[in-house]
Amino acid sequence: MISELNYFMRKLHHISGPILYWNLLAMILIGLMEGIGIYMLVPMLSLIGVFEMGSSGIHIPWLTELLHRFSENGQLLLVLLAFVFILSGQAWMQRLQTIRNTRIQQQFIRTLRLETYSALLRARWSFFLQKRKSDFNHILTTELARVSQGTSLVLQMAASLIFTAIQIGLAFWLSAKLTTLVLVSGLLLFVLLRKFVRRAKQIGDQTSEFSQSYYYGITEHFNGIKDIKSNMLESSHIRWFDRICSQIERNVVQFSQLNTGTQLIHRVSAAIIIAAFIYLSLQVMSVPPANLLLIILIFSRLWPRFTAIQSNLEYISSMLPAFRIVRELKDQTEKNCEIRESRKEIGTPASQPIAPIDLVKSIVCEDVDYRYEGSDTYALKNVQACIPAQGMTAIVGKSGAGKSTFVDLIMGLVKPESGRILIDGKPLTEEQLLNWRSSIGYVSQDPFLFHTSIRENLRLVDPDASEEQMWRALQFSSSASFVRKLPQGLDTIIGDRGIRLSGGERQRLVLARTMLRNPSVLVLDEATSALDSENEQHIHEAIERLKGHVTIIVIAHRLSTIRTADRVIVLEEGRVIQEGGYQQLSMDSSGTFSKLLHMQAGAAGQ
Ligand code: ADP
């Protein structure tokens, strides 16, 4: 656990550099000034004869001499002026230091956020298959915020320790015996309260657990809101929500109970110790009243520092799980890194452009087996298939037959367990993966458009795309006519709070966006639903227009869109059971393809 803290501290050092030491220096100065300002008031007053301090206190002959040159009133004014000056200077420096601390902390968290986010985006697809997306949201928001808070607490703790050390030093100078007594009591109490620090960490573990379930729950529920509404599941979900909220509430209250509990112990001990001191001083040791004032002064300055350190330790302990979670994610994403780019280069022109591969002959699957992690059954087994360049290939089969997995393998999103993918006869290797992927345009079933204008959505792939290029792409994807009819044309805002588009329209817009990239291979996962026959016709037209220009791979759910396919690959339970031209397969009346055709024709006829 402490290694995690150590890791983040080293990271902080790496990110912030020398400014951390400036910060430390400033802390020492501030500590000194605060110490001098408060501690010295009484002795300075004694110096000019306001108090009689006996043997303790400070004796600086030259200062006494200097002060005695002034009148009595002048001396008092001088001492008080010095006091005001020191304390104001300290307050001013404190402000600068707080700002610097905020800067250090914010720079640290920004770097951490950027690193976590980009490491996530650069991780390979198979990594995302095993993970819950809500956990990423959770880590990028809550856990990173806790790490940030934790780091700031560690900085505060460092400040606290330095202040304490300085004050202990000053207090020692004033009275070594008294200070030793206060120190011993403080350490004793700290040892006695150790178990509370450990308990704080357990509470912190629960905090992570609860907030993770909270994120997971709300993400799931809003993804499935239609099912919830239409099946009247609201009350059971509200009950779940209520339960998790109560757990979160209990967890926070528990921490507060623990933290205030130790604070209480500290304060009560303070009262007992100081009462004992005063009793001993007055009754047993007959200490003069000015010294008594010194005792109270030292104690009232030092003790709250110990209390603050205890409290800080508890807070830091409760944040340690967040440090662990962020670190674990970092390790995992590093292990699964697909795109290696140095941090400086992310998103800048300095990053090497990835040269696409121009497919000229074919994509071949050779004896490919694939199993999802944690699954015993093969999603694809012994797959042999050939996808000719420039042609249109349709992948068909029932749901769960392995169509998406097959296409993911071809796109290099997942790696075959055994067997090879050959691109123009050359095996697809790790080194070529990104070049290959940059030649592919993919249009998913549930197309993803940002909540911004159509123009901005299109520019996402090509920031320099001209108006003419955009319209050409829209034309190609059969979306030009509906975009023209929209109130603001290309500048119409789409997405959640903008114009609502049908599934088919969204898919065609994504197709237009994909075409702007000039892919050499277009993969189209045909929507199973949300495609009325008019939309289907549009998609069909778009495919026809693209035929011959690019290699088209369609995951077909409606066999009517693939009538003109050059090649059809039929999958069943992870195996290729038929492969050939559309006409050829549809004539083979005993084959699965013609059965599928009949089934769909029957369904359409009803
Ligand atoms: P299709 O696209 O034809 O509907 P898929 O390629 O999605 O089929 O699925 C093929 C098989 O792999 C199915 O048995 C499915 O249950 C399994 N599968 C798909 N995705 C995953 C996953 N992420 N983890 C485990 N098994 C999966």
Image (spheres, rainbow, N blue to C red):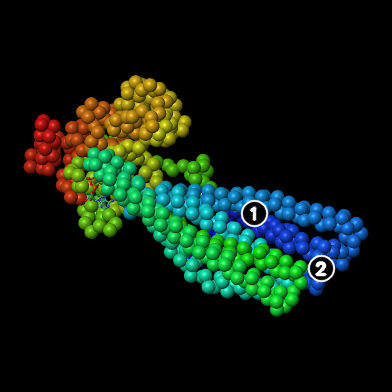
- Quadrant of the rendered image containing residue 451: top left
Q: Secondary structure at mark 2?
A: loop
Q: Please indicate whether residue 199 sits to the left or right of residue 131 in the image.
A: right
Name the residue located 48 percent from the left edge and 70 percent from the top edge. 195
The answer, for residue 329, to whether it is visible in the render is yes
> x and y percent of residue 318 in the render?
48, 61
Q: Nearer the viewer, residue 111 or 416?
A: 111
> x and y percent of residue 534 in the render?
23, 26
Q: Where, quadrant-wise, is the C terminus in this rendering? A: top left
Q: Nearer the viewer, residue 249 or 517?
A: 249
Badge 1 amino acid: Ile
Q: Please indicate whether residue 500 sits to the left or right of residue 377 in the image.
A: right
Name the residue located 42 percent from the left edge and 42 percent from the top edge. 355
Q: Is residue 55 above or below residue 143?
A: below
Q: What count of labels does the image hold? A: 2
Q: Secondary structure at mark 1?
A: helix
Residue marked by disc 1:
19
Name the residue located 29 percent from the left edge and 30 percent from the top edge. 502
Q: Is residue 114 above or below residue 536?
A: below
Residue marked by disc 2:
52
Q: Nearer the viewer, residue 393 or 481?
A: 481
> x and y percent of residue 516 in the render?
39, 32
